[in-house]
Image (spheres, helix red, strand yellow):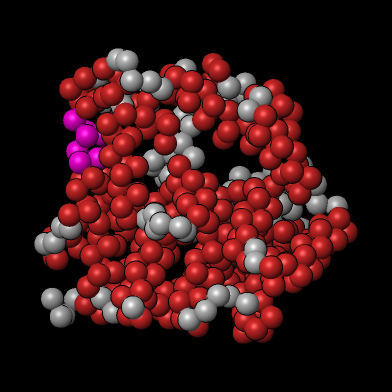
Amino acid sequence: MKIIKPSSLTFLIIIIVSLATSPAFAFDDEKKNIALIAIMAISPLIILIYKKIYSNDIPLLLFMSSIILFPAFLHPETMRWSTVMYTAMFGLTFLAYKLLLYHNNFRREIYLKVLKYLIFAYVLVLLIQQFCVLTGIPIFNVSNYRLNEPWKLNSLTSEPSTSARIVALLMFSYITIKELIILRKYDFRIDFKTDKWVWLSFIWTMVTMGSGTAFLFLAMVLLKFVRLKSLAPLLVIFLGITLFVNALEIVTFERTFRSFMAVLTLDSEKIYEADHSAAFRIIPLIILAQRIGFTSINDWFGYGVDFVGSFLSDEVRGLPEGWTSGGLLQLWVDYGFVVFILFITFNLINIVKKGDYLSMAFWFMIVFIQGINNQILWLGIVLLFTNKYFKKSAEKRYN
């Protein structure tokens, strides 16, 4: 065991990095992240090496078993082994990560550096891409690029909105861990001096990548500092960003505000009018919320793998045929309430900390409204779990 510990600490960091990035070269012709799949394929070996399962792992193990057993017995004609095994691989990767975290000297300072360098990596790739657009040379690491939106750039994932979510989560986690290290609340007046490059990298990425989602998540990160004595610097930052956005005529800021206000109405037509891209993520949630129930055996044990994909495109205008969406409500419809509640229980046990409402908000925006086989969902689980782990460790140390 001692022989593998140095490399296993490295593998722990590799899991974080592989979940936090999806560079263009890593995708195959079917848009699968081959690099991530290779890392996940190694994860079961870690579990075999440590031979340890914790009591709070039981909901996840039952979840992984249920997504195989329920459709196999009740709707065998829908069974897609590649889909359910891919989900199981994500679950096993989390279990492997948890074992590595518990059995290695992964200090808060190391975790903080990993978060910081990932933020730096995102802004560096974005700057290179922006230079490519400016000079007219082929764009580095480009993905899902549209000529009519030349400054909408993906940085280190497949699309700008995904990068926005990840960078915001990285920054939120960075601030959370920094507070544990300095033993006090983060203070702009004091801490900006030491973290100025992290903040500049974060702000530049969020404001200039061309994603409307970025402005929503930027606001979420700044909510971390909503305290009376911090209102003045927050207002200065917000004003500065607003002036910068207006100077560059970045229309995504206005579109984000319109989308936010439209979502509050729960009116599908108004959401469509505000932003088609947002509509593809929000309207499926509304549709599936109207379909879930407790009255039939399918409500409890699912309609079958990818059942949502058989009807969603008929109800969401412009959605490709066979497309699945609706976040964890899709999990409920496809696999049933039992599977859904097992997954929610796993999240509540491992992620949620009483009174940490902003972490809950990030969980909802990054985990709950994402598809179960989306790597950003599992990145959210890994980082929020790690934040909670270090918080609990700090409480034990100082109480």
Residue at the spot 49% in from the left edge and 66% down from the top edge = 173
Residue at the spot 66% in from the left edge and 56% down from the top edge = 219
Asked whether residue 106 is in view, the answer is: no
Looking at the image, which is closer to me, 114 or 234? 234
Residue at the spot 69% in from the left edge and 72% down from the top edge = 229
Q: Is residue 41 magenta?
A: no
- In the rendered structure, the answer to whether residue 359 lies left or right of residue 80 reads right
- In the rendered structure, the answer to whether residue 170 lies left or right of residue 256 reads left
Q: Main secondary structure of the magenta part?
A: helix
Tell me the magenta residue range. 62-69
Using the image, determine if residue 304 lies above or below residue 13: above
Q: Quadrant where the N terminus lies?
A: bottom left
Q: Position of residue 341 (x, y in %)?
A: 31, 36
Looking at the image, which is closer to me, 398 or 23? 398
- In the rendered structure, the answer to whether residue 381 lies left or right of residue 65 reads right
Q: Quadrant of residue 255?
A: top right
Residue at the spot 69% in from the left edge and 47% down from the top edge = 212
Q: Quadrant where the C terminus lies?
A: bottom left
Using the image, determine if residue 111 lies above or below residue 72: below
Using the image, determine if residue 49 lies above or below residue 60: below
Q: Position of residue 61 (x, y in %)?
A: 20, 45
In this rendering, the count of numbered labels is: 0
Asked whether residue 354 is in view, the answer is: yes
Using the image, determine if residue 287 lies above or below residue 341: above
Question: Residue pushed farthest right?
Answer: 247
Q: Position of residue 379 (x, y in %)?
A: 42, 55
Q: Position of residue 69 (x, y in %)?
A: 18, 30
Q: Is residue 64 magenta?
A: yes
Q: Quadrant of residue 86?
A: top left
